């Protein structure tokens, strides 16, 4: 709290891909934290906390990510700052980041006592304006995957076109025609064949690709 | 100042188009404010101030715009939040907005005692990290004008294709081929002929257009 009467918080929307609990299909998930004090005690909320005096904004978001999931992010970007006067009983301005975490890393992550991973499109009603913030982050992710190679942050450095398409399908929640996807993905010129094939598959193993990343595509911070 | 030791400020980068003082060509300008206290006393800085307890973020940005220029903005959007620990001797987190102001409105605006309009690409060295913030805002404007009809916020509701092209040329600081521009602009489907022509011109008066704005193109707040 401040002389201005305003608390400054940093929250992080963390996305990962995991199988849906009933359909088994690859689906977007995010971790939520149960509030252990008022207001909204007992409600689920985005992980975060007050900005510390000696912490940069992105460092704060990264610490939240590590504290919540035990993971480091492969992608972290500032999303938006939410500061409506009435979003909390006491004035809080939240600077929100969003992060993408690799699926194979999340497989080893377990829910903590007050942390639970939820399907992003099936979350319970959250504390404060956090429902709207999750929707804002989903909109950003779904827009950005259509024009930027951020799908790579969900993938291993080398991947098949089928794996890349599966990420797009999971994020956009729709089927994508394999032939069209292949044509469009290769037309972007950001995909480079590694010259290797997926091993362990028997007949006609699929080719592996990696992203050729230009400086403007790098993780912004 | 706060128990967290952090001040929360809102600043606004305000762009308008005016003739360049030496070349006379239409150019991007922005108003700067001279600091009248330490730190950086006497230096030019972006207009802004502490967030008031009962003010929403966009309202704070709008009040800064009105106070600085005497104008209301046709376009106001959150740009980014800057919060590096060392950006000011005392910790300040600045939530920055950017605004576009119509050229004909700016024509009547005069510089105040501590306010001065400057050519955006020729500003003096600013206080704090404000040079970087101006560059960030210029990058956003120059990217966004290529995929979104924001040029309309610099124009009257009805305009000729030559006027629209002049806005793009001024923002992007480059010549654009009239025939290519015409073809690409009409291909976006957002331009609608009004059925009228520019009056006051003698021979073959140019057609007037307006933007057909969909909900997703509206001013975000």
Image (cartoon, coloured by chain):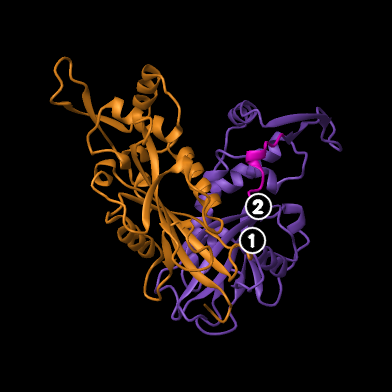
Chain colours: A orange, B purple
Query: Could you tell me which chain the residue with mark 2 belongs to?
Result: B
Count of marks overlaid on the render: 2
Dot 2 corresponds to which residue? B221
Whether the magenta-drawn stretch holds residue B220 is answered as yes
Q: In the displayed structure, would residue A35 be above or below residue B149?
A: below
Disc 1 with disc 2 on a shared chain: yes
Q: CA distance from mark 1 to mark 2?
A: 8 Å
Whether the magenta-drawn stretch holds residue A101 is answered as no
Disc 1, disc 2: CB below 8 Å? yes
Nearest to the observer: residue B66 or residue A110:
A110
Q: Secondary structure at mark 1?
A: helix
Q: Examine the rendering and report whether any part of residue B173 can be seen.
A: no
Is B56 displayed left or right of A131 in the figure?
right
Is B120 displayed left or right of A160 in the figure?
right
Q: Examine the rendering and report whether any part of residue A16 can be seen.
A: yes
Nearest to the observer: residue B57 or residue A41:
A41
The residue at 56%/71% (across/down) is B9
Quadrant of res B105: bottom right
> Which range of residues does the magenta coloring cover?
B212-221
Dot 1 corresponds to which residue? B58
The dot on residue B28 is none
Nearest to the observer: residue A171 or residue A40:
A40
Nearest to the observer: residue B118 or residue B58:
B58
Q: In the displayed structure, would residue B181 be above or below residue B84?
A: above
Is A167 displayed left or right of A205 in the figure?
right
Is B174 displayed left or right of A183 in the figure?
right
**Residue B126 percent coordinates (x, y):** 51, 71
Q: Secondary structure at mark 2?
A: loop
**Residue A84 percent coordinates (x, y):** 62, 62
């Amino acid at each position: 709290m401040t002389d201005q009467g305003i608390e400054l918080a940093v929250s992080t929307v963390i996305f990962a891909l995991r199988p849906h609990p009933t359909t088994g299909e690859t689906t977007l998930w995010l971790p939520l934290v149960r509030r252990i004090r008022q207001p909204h005690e007992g409600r689920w909320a985005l992980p975060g906390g007050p900005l510390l005096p000696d912490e940069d904004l992105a460092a704060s978001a990264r610490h939240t990510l590590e504290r919540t999931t035990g993971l480091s992010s492969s992608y972290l970007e500032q999303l938006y700052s939410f500061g409506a006067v009435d979003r909390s009983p006491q004035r809080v301005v939240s600077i929100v980041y969003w992060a993408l975490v690799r699926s194979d890393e999340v497989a080893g992550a377990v829910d903590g006592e007050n942390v639970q991973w939820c399907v992003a499109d099936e979350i319970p009603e959250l504390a404060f304006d956090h429902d709207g913030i999750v929707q804002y982050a989903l909109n950003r992710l779904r827009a950005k995957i259509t024009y930027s190679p951020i799908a790579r942050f969900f993938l291993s450095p080398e991947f098949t076109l089928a794996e890349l398409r599966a990420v797009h399908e999971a994020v956009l929640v729709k089927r994508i025609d394999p032939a069209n996807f292949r044509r469009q993905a290769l037309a972007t010129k950001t995909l480079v064949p590694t010259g290797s094939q997926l091993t362990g598959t028997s007949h006609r193993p699929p080719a592996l690709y990696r992203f050729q990343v230009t400086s403007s595509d790098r993780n912004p911070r």
